[in-house]
Structure formats: C-alpha cells, structure tokens
Image: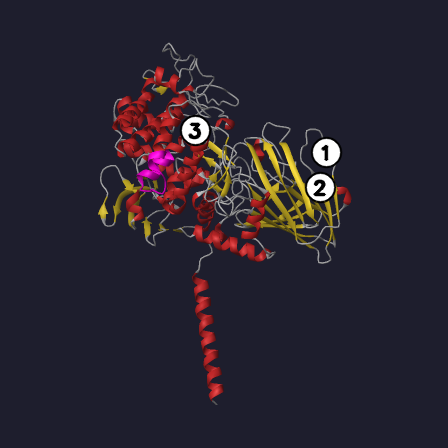
Amino acid sequence: MNNLLMNYKKLLLSICFLIVAFSSFAQQKDYTRYVYTFIGTDGTGHTFPGPSMPFGLVQPGPDNRDQGWDYTSGYQYKDSLILGFSQTRSNGTGISEYGDILLQPYTSVNKAGLAETYNKKSEQATPGYYTVTLGNRVKIELTCSDHVAFHKYTFPGKYAFLLVDLQHGLRFLTDSLVLDSKVQIENKTTISGYCHTRNWVDRKYYFTIQFNKPFKIIDLLPRQPKENAPRYTIQFDIPENVLLTKIALSTTAVEGAKLNLQSELPGWDFNATVSKAKKTWNHYLSHIEIEATLQQKQVFYTSLYRLFLQPTNIADADGSYRGADDTVRVAVNKEYYSTLSLWDTYRAAHPLYTIIAPERVNGFIRTLIAHATATGFLPIWTAWGKDNYCMIGNHAIPVITDAFNKGFRGFDTTLALQQMIQSTSVNHMNSNWQLLNRFGYYPFDSLDNESVSRTLEHGVDDYCIAVMAAKMGNKEIADQYYNRALYYKHVYDPNTRQMRGKDSKGNWRTPFNPLTATSPMNNPGDYTEANAWQYFWTPAQYDVQGMIGLLGGKQQFTAQLDSFFTIRTPNPDKYLGQEAMIGQYAHGNEPSHHIAYLYAYSATPKTGHYYIHQVVRDFYKQTPDGMIGNDDCGQMSAWYILSVLGFYQVNPADPSFVLGAPQVKKAILHLQNGKTFTVEAPEYSDKNIYASTYTLNNHPIANIPSLRYTAIMQGGSLLVKMQSR
C-alpha cells in the first residue's frame, strides 16, 4: 500500500512538472517565426536568405551567379538557377565580396560544375536554417554556428557526387579572384588549406572541410586560365542517402579553423545545431517586443534580424585574428569585428546597438582602435579585417564619440582621441587634410570628384572630435575642430541656396543643376551617389541652428524642407542612389535618412511625422521586393526599427534621440540590465499618424521633443498621444 501511494505521488509530481514545463514553454515567444529572410532578395535590397548567427563569421547560402551588381550577395529571388552553396557573403552591400568555397551536390558524373534548376516551392528559410530541393532531386539543408557552416544533403539514391570549388567567389570587376592557394587532402573525410584572394579587399581565408562519410573517389579538375585554386569532384557511397558536411573558416590558420570546428561543432547533430541557432536568435530578437499586425511584425523582426548579421566577429575561438597589416594578434575578450560599413551604419545602426546590444559596443570600439594601431588611421569600410576604402569621410569617428558620450569606457579613450586626430590630420585615401585646411573646402579642380560631399562628410567627423576633445578637457583641439566643422559654410551658395562645387579660385562650378545626381563610379561630380539637394542637409546632423541661420530663419528652413520633399526629379537614375523617392528625399541612400526628423526644428514639426509614416508604409514590405535600396549592412533596417519606435538619433555627437511618431501602438525594449523601456501610442492607426504630446515617466516633454539615451537605459515609459491632423 505504501509503495502504491509513493508511486501515485511520483506520478502526480511528474504530471505537475510536465504542466509547469509546458506552461513555461507556451509562454516563451518564438520571434523567429516573424522573420522572413527573403525580404530584400528581389531587386536592390541585396540581402540573402541563408543562415547566419548574430555577428557570426559564416553565412552559407545559395549563389545564383558569381558577379554582377544585382548579385552582390550571390542571390536574386527570381533567378531560376543555383551554381552551388558558398559559405560567406555580406548583407545588402553594393559591391561583391566573399562567396568562399562553393559546394554543389549532383547525381551524375557528367553534371560537375553545372548550375542546377530548383523547386521554388521547396525553398524555405528561417533564422539559422535554409532548405531547397534542386532539379536533380537533391534536398539541401543548411545551418551554421559562428565560424562553421553545416550542410546536409539528402540524395535520391545511394551514390552521391559533390563539387568542391575553391576558385569560386563573388567577384567585383575582376576575372582572376584567387592569387594563391594551398590545399591538402588530409584523409578520406578531411580537406584543409587556404586561399589568398584579391577582390574588394586583399585577404586570406583558411578552412577545413569535413565529411561524415569517407569519400570513394576524388578527382582534381583541370585548371582553366587565370585559376589559382583547385576544384574537386568527389564521389561517396551513402546507403542511407544522407551526406553531412562541415566547413570551418578562420582568418589566421588552418589550425584556427580546426579549433573553431572543435569548439563549436565537434559532433554531427544537424537538428541540434538548427535548434541552438533558433534559440540564440530568439534571445536577440526578444530585445524588442511590439504590438502590431502580423505584416508589420514580419518587417520589424526581419529588420531586427538583419541588424544583428553584422559587424562580424572574425576572431577565432581563442581570440586570434589576422589584422589589417596581415599580422596575427589576440583580441581582448575574443572580439575583433569586421564588415564595418561605417559610412552607412554610423547614422542609425550603431546608435541602435548601444541600446539593444550594448555588450558589443566596447568590442566595436576596441576593433576600430586596433585597426588604427595597425595601419595608422581609423577604418573606412572593412571586410575580413581589411580596409576597402569604400565611401568617404572617416566615420569610425562618430561611432567612437557616440559610445564615449553614452558612457562606454571599455577602451582606451586617450588613445582613441589620438587616433581620431591622426586620422584627420595625416593624409590617407580620400582624405587630403592639407588641401582642406588651405582652402577651407575641397576645390573641385583639385579633386577628381566628390568635392562637396567630402567637405561636408568631414564636417560631421570634425564636430565629433571637437565634442569628445572638449569633454576630455582638451580645449585647443576642441576649438580647432569646432572651427573646421564650420567649413560647410564655405561651399554654401546663397543664390542657389545649395552646397555647391567651388574651384581653387573661389568660382562656383557651372553649369549647375541641383537635381543632377553624381557618383564616382559612373557619373563623376561633386556629390557621392546623390545630388545637391540631398547633401545640403548633411551639416544639419550636428549644426541645425547654424543651418537655420544660414537660410535666414526658421520659416526659410521650413520652406527649404518643404521644397526638398516636393520637388521631383524626372526619370531618376536608381544607380546613383535615387531610390524610394519622395520629392528629392531618397530613402534608398543614407544621406537622406535623418532629414524627415529635421522638421522637429522647423515651424511645422508634425510634417516630419507625415513623411516618416509614408516611408515606413511605402518602402518596407513583407515581400521579397519589399526593400527599396541596399540594406547596407543593417542601416536601412535600423532606420525602420528606430522610426517604428518613434525616435532617431540625428546628431551622432549628442546622446539623445529626436522624437518623431511611433508606428505601433506599443513597443517594449527589454534592456540588458533587466529593465524595460516602453513606448505606448494607443491611438496610433493609419489615420492617427501625428504625435501631439509626449510624456516621459508621467512628465510632459516640452520644447523640441527629444529623448536622452540615459532615460531609455534607466527604464521607464514614453506615452505618445496620436491624432489625425
């Protein structure tokens, strides 16, 4: 009887445990179900559907083609062929890089190296997982850890063939991608080696490839002209029809790749790897919880997903990394980041990281400092730890100042300031300081192009240096850079009311059409992928009052904004950044991103709310063609996230956010310190798009509405009353 009673109690306890466990599971929210990784894969978004980890090194996925502006991620949604599955790529860039180690399964000895059709309906993806069935009936499944891509192939029969192409890469203006390689077939389950490539950057990657089954036959394919890396065809016998492959990468050595493999994926449990990736992604996606429609949740959480795809931590499991000077070092906290598209991401992505990924910020800044220590100046745009010098300005500077102003101190602030000064006083790519200081602007007859844009972009950096130097007590440096930040006034033409190209004798460039967009790649001129109207507002990021004064007062400032959003360009050229247009506002290009928020300083502040709502509504969709313009390493996504929350950091040297109008009824930020910050706009709808009042922790916000970074991070609530007029 006693035994029966004890067993009964055990049964009850077990049932109670299951009920509690099920209840806990039911309460856990799966945010990955809102992520539609195909958003932006059709058209100019240049995103990719393959798996990745937050800030991870590898991004395995399908490559439809290996070159072309439309294929910078290797993928276009409507393409009907797949060349194979490579292990690295970048998110939403305008230039191709990576595409390392292409693998293509096939079923016939005569099919090696040929593109395959695929069943579009079979193609599915979620964070950490991708699958598709090829025309040869091989089912492809992909997942990954931080440094290791994991492939699962299910063949229609017991004979399996695999192409391993080490010559492959996503190319930009080059026919010969690989300069040198050394590959070793270690045994019947392992291939290791390295490749030295030159494309957007000059870099080296090291790898080890492992199979869960020994191969039967391996053949080296004949090399074609200009090929410097091997391509293999491999045959397996697999009675159970499944072949698993792991590809580990490193910037340092084959030993580094093997260490990454052993540290992250020592076993062969594919499903467990998918589950771990999903759990990790849910952790990051749960940082923000919104009350919205299903369609808006899909756009929002996909944007949040894309924000966390980069910067990529290229340090090995032991912290080793190959720096910009080709020297292997060990990173503090095992963090060294690359894929730093700073011209884009300083505007919204990095300010957003300080809120929802603050644990990464010190590592970002230490990386910038380490890069400058190795090269002599702060990075411009890095891939695989190497600078490609793409774009203009020195926008590591606002990222450092922003972190400093927000209280991050996990880096050497004195050294950081020294490197900021050195980077803006010693000439390097796209930065001629003697020329700038001599004239107070870049004369267009002394540069081949971008004279106005370079002058204006440097002003942003100079102001950030001045602010940081002043806070650190260096008045002399602060005064020098405050003065230089005002150089934008030297290229302001009061007659056309535009920032305009000027030569070394002080003459304006003629003829002048402020609607004409220029680009260094295909239409050289005074502006960078933009026109005079779009670049006019660059100094307003840090000196909006100076811009108001330049135009003659608030009414004139308002009129200039109104004209900007209503003047249309006939037949805008999308390849010069003229995408997602509202008047002259081009949301597809980053110099426009802060401009709607400048209405907060105008005579009609709520006009900005109208345009913010229009951008959110019209230019972000939950469809493959739902992103107009490159995602640019998460910047387009970051703009959306912040604007949905209802605020945006206009000035990178001011740790506050200009308040706009929330685009959801409620959002909760789950902060790293365990606190929450809630934004509520209960009256929000497609008609009630204007914010009338803001109340922070029961206290009304007066004057120009803004929200301090500290107010967010301390937790609390922002109540926004919305109206239709």
Q: Secondary structure at mark 2?
A: strand
The amino acid type of the residue labelled 2 equals Tyr
Q: Main secondary structure of the magenta part?
A: helix
Residue that carries the numbered disc 1 in the rendered image? 223
For marks 2 and 3, give the CA distance: 41 Å
Q: Which residue is mark 2?
A: 232
Q: Are marks 3 and 1 in contact (CB under 8 Å)?
A: no
What is the quadrant of the C terminus in the image? top left
Where residue 188 appears, as percent x and y from the top left, is 71, 50
In front: label 3 or label 1: 3
Crowd rating for badge 1 (residues with CA inside 10 Å; few <14, some 14–19, many 20+): few
Badge 3 is on which residue? Answer: 376
Position of residue 137 measured from the top left corner of the image (x, y, whole percent): 70, 50
Q: How is the image coloured?
A: secondary structure
SS at mark 3? Answer: loop
Crowding at label 2, few (<14), some or many (≥20) Cα neighbours within 10 Å? some
The kind of secondary structure element at disc 1 is: loop
Report the amino acid beneath label 1: Arg
Question: Which quadrant of the structure image shows residue 109?
Answer: top right
Is there a contact, CB below 8 Å, between mark 2 and mark 1?
no
Choose the circle earlier in sequence order: 2 or 3: 2
Residue drawn at x 58%, y 48% is 258
- Relative to residue 116, is residue 360 drawn left or right? left
| Left or right position of 536 against 168 | left
Q: Is residue 577 placed above or below 355 in the rendered structure?
A: above
- Queried whether the magenta region covers residue 410, the answer comes back as yes
User: Magenta part of the protein: which range?
Assistant: 398-415
3D distance between C-alphas at marks 3 and 1: 40 Å
For the point 74% across and 55% down, which residue is it? 158
Q: Which of disc 1 and disc 2 is earlier in sequence? A: 1
Does residue 712 belong to the magenta stretch? no
Give 698 or 205, whichever is nearer the viewer: 205
